[in-house]
Image: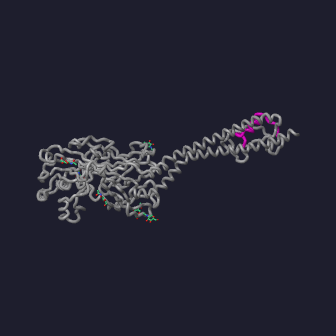
């Protein structure tokens, strides 16, 4: 009797112990489940969070940074100074060019006249201010260079198909105004404008509708200040896949110059924001008005350590056939509305966006263009990818530009016009004028910190949390199992004497547990009642004790 009571008491303690252990098992399983849930879903949550955070809404960080970028973009300008203008015109010598520069301008960007719309778009105008940085430049803005007279050569090249008497009239006007095919101007004048007699004349005599908008000529004339172009972009509120893309440019949702909708499309970034979630297969588009088209950019390589913060980025760059002739890239036929003949390999005709001036865009040093253009002049070194390629590094999850180099060369496509004596000896030639590089080097620390937090930390947190919880769960499980097995071992010896006070496991309710041992039916009640059950074999008893097989009464979860 005494033995019986002792055993009964022991059995109660054992049950209590078992419940605790069952609870531990339950908690450890919870850990494992949470670990798995975090492993599977965490990235999705972070993605959703990022996508809601980057929306351009009044008051958000992204909005402030977009509106007043906390960066100092730099514009470096290299001008091709013509050193043998007379020999070129009189003796038919190859033009000798001397690349001078860089002339560096620090830029300050701001978006002004902001007008948010109800449909998830915002309208603005871009203000860019340029400040000459003498310390970073190789010369001063007052340095004199000799360059082709772009207004004159534009006029003469355009007159090629006009009536002959018009060309003769042009020649005598140019005689009177003493206009020459080359001009000597300072860097400042070439960029920011000088009074051009031809433009002044045009302004006075040409009918109002055809008037050029200004009487000064400069390659960056009117660019210092607020742009007249009114741009509407998507804020990402309604459709994050169009985040940062242009909706309307000066009220138009399409360009009008080109032959197909694809080529006329304005669905492109202005270069500051890109849709989030870019992959290596993505093509991003950048629209720049002076480029007269949107520029496709494709993945080139991974950037490991942007801004020395361990932020990963993707480098996007134009495909090598972007400006290819229509033989190598038939898609470019849409950019040739009045052709063929179309633009030669590596050049892009922007004449339609430049008041019909015969301006051709290429990459600096004719990178990716036919080498014959570079060899037609002297003094341009062979192109180098690192120095002359255009690229943007983008943080793919957030679509934020990390750094960028927009590099473009401006060339004048001169046509020989023998009736105009001033230019009669100026042959058909693609004459390089200058190239520039507009770049953002690195973002300020506060932006980098946030980018790091948003993009590099979550994967780390995910791994640490999920693996941590998982490991903790497994560890707890093993420990509790180990304890139970050991105590069950002890219990086995006891049960040999006291035999029959043990629970009959309930049938499995949970599909993913180990198979239940088939106990001989005893019709017994739970051991808590202290009633006597039939004697089981020692092995069965042990199995019944093993928490892996016993349904934990509190939770219903078993191993
Ligand atoms: C943003 O909100 C502030 C105050 O709520 C307001 O003064 C400002 O005009 C708003 N800006 C824009 C662009 O809507
Ligand atoms: C450009 O070339 C001309 C003629 O050779 C020369 O006088 C002038 O100094 C050059 N300009 C620069 C900035 O080197
Ligand atoms: C959004 O609203 C603006 C102003 O009403 C309009 O110009 C623009 O076309 C609209 N955009 C879309 C996508 O509906
Ligand atoms: C641009 O405009 C600002 C302000 O009007 C002026 O301070 C700056 O010198 C200008 N830059 C150039 C290159 O003319
Ligand atoms: C990228 O494209 C290739 C081939 O078209 C495809 O196999 C791959 O799965 C794509 N990768 C992504 C991330 O979409
Ligand atoms: C450039 O485009 C204009 C307008 O389409 C065309 O008149 C001109 O001939 C083109 N120039 C070249 C060199 O193809």
The residue furthest front is 135
Residue 333 appears in the picture as rendered: no
Q: Residue drawn 59% across and 45% down? A: 35
Quarter containing the C terminus: top right
Identify the residue at image location x=40%, y=58%: 68
- Residue 138, position in %: x, y? 27, 48
Residue 374 forms part of the magenta stretch? no
Q: Residue at 60% of width from left, 44% of height from top?
A: 469
Q: Residue extending furthest right?
A: 1
Q: Which residues are magenta?
A: 533-551
Q: Nearer the viewer, residue 173 or 322?
A: 173
Question: Which quadrant of the figure shows ligand 3?
Answer: bottom left
Which part of the image, by quadrant, shows the N terminus?
A: top right
- Residue 518 in percent (x, y) is at 74, 37
Report the residue that reaches farthest toward the bottom: 208
Query: How does the figure colour the protein chain or chains?
Result: one colour
Residue 396 visible in image: yes
- Is residue 483 toward the left or the right of residue 279 in the image? right
Q: Nearer the viewer, residue 115 or 251?
A: 115
> Residue 425 placed where, x, y %?
13, 48
Q: Is residue 201 left or right of residue 444?
A: left
Q: Point out residue 154 in the picture as x, y percentages from the top left corner.
A: 20, 54
Find residue 529 and report its image quarter.
Answer: top right
Picture quarter containing residue 550?
Answer: top right
């Amino acid at each position: 009797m005494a033995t019986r009571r002792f055993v009964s008491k022991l059995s109660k303690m054992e049950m209590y112990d078992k419940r605790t252990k069952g609870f531990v098992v339950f908690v450890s399983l919870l850990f494992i489940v949470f670990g798995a849930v975090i492993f599977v879903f965490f990235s999705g949550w972070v993605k959703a969070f990022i996508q809601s955070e980057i929306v351009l809404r009044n008051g958000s960080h992204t909005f402030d940074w977009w509106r007043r970028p906390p960066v100092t973009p730099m514009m470096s300008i290299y001008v091709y100074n013509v050193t043998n203008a007379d020999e070129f015109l009189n003796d038919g010598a190859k033009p000798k060019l001397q690349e001078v520069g860089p002339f560096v301008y620090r830029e300050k960007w701001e978006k002004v006249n902001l007008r948010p719309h109800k449909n998830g778009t915002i309208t603005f105008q871009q203000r860019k201010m340029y400040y000459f940085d003498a310390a970073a430049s190789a010369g001063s803005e007052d340095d004199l260079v000799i360059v082709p007279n772009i207004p004159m050569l534009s006029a003469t090249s355009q007159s090629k198909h006009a009536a002959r008497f018009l060309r003769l009239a042009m020649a005598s006007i140019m005689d009177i105004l003493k206009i020459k095919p080359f001009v000597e101007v300072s860097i400042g004048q070439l960029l920011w404008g000088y009074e051009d007699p031809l433009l002044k004349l045009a302004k006075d005599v040409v009918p109002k509708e055809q008037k050029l908008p200004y009487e000064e000529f400069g390659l960056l004339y009117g660019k210092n200040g607020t742009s007249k172009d009114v741009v509407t972009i998507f804020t990402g509120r309604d459709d994050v896949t169009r985040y940062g893309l242009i909706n309307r440019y000066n009220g138009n949702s399409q360009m009008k110059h080109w032959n197909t909708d694809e080529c006329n499309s304005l669905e492109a970034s202005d270069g500051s924001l890109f849709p989030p979630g870019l992959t290596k297969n993505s093509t991003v588009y950048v629209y720049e008005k002076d480029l007269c088209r949107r520029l496709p950019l494709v993945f080139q390589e991974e950037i490991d350590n942007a801004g020395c913060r361990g932020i990963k980025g993707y480098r996007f760059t134009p495909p090598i056939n972007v400006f290819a002739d229509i033989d190598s890239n038939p898609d470019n036929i849409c950019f040739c509305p009045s052709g063929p003949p179309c633009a030669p390999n590596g050049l892009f005709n922007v004449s339609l966006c430049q008041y019909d001036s015969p301006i051709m865009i290429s990459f600096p040093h004719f990178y990716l263009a036919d080498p014959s253009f570079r060899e037609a002049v002297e003094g341009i070194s062979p192109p180098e990818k690192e120095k002359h390629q255009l690229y943007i590094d983008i943080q793919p999850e957030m679509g934020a530009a990390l750094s960028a180099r927009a590099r473009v060369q401006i060339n004048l496509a001169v046509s020989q016009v023998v009736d105009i004596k001033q230019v009669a000896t100026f042959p058909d030639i693609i004459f390089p004028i200058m190239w520039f590089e507009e770049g953002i080097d690195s973002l300020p620390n506060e932006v980098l910190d946030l980018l790091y937090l948003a993009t590099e930390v979550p994967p780390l947190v995910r791994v640490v949390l999920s693996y941590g919880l998982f490991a903790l769960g497994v560890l707890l499980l093993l420990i509790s199992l180990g304890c139970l097995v050991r105590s069950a071992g002890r219990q086995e010896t006891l049960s040999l004497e006291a035999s029959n006070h043990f629970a009959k496991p309930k049938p499995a309710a949970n599909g993913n547990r180990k198979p239940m041992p088939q106990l001989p039916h005893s019709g017994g009640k739970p051991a808590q009642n202290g009633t006597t059950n039939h004697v089981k074999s020692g092995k069965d008893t042990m199995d019944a004790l093993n928490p892996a097989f016993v349904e934990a009464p509190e939770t219903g979860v078993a191993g």
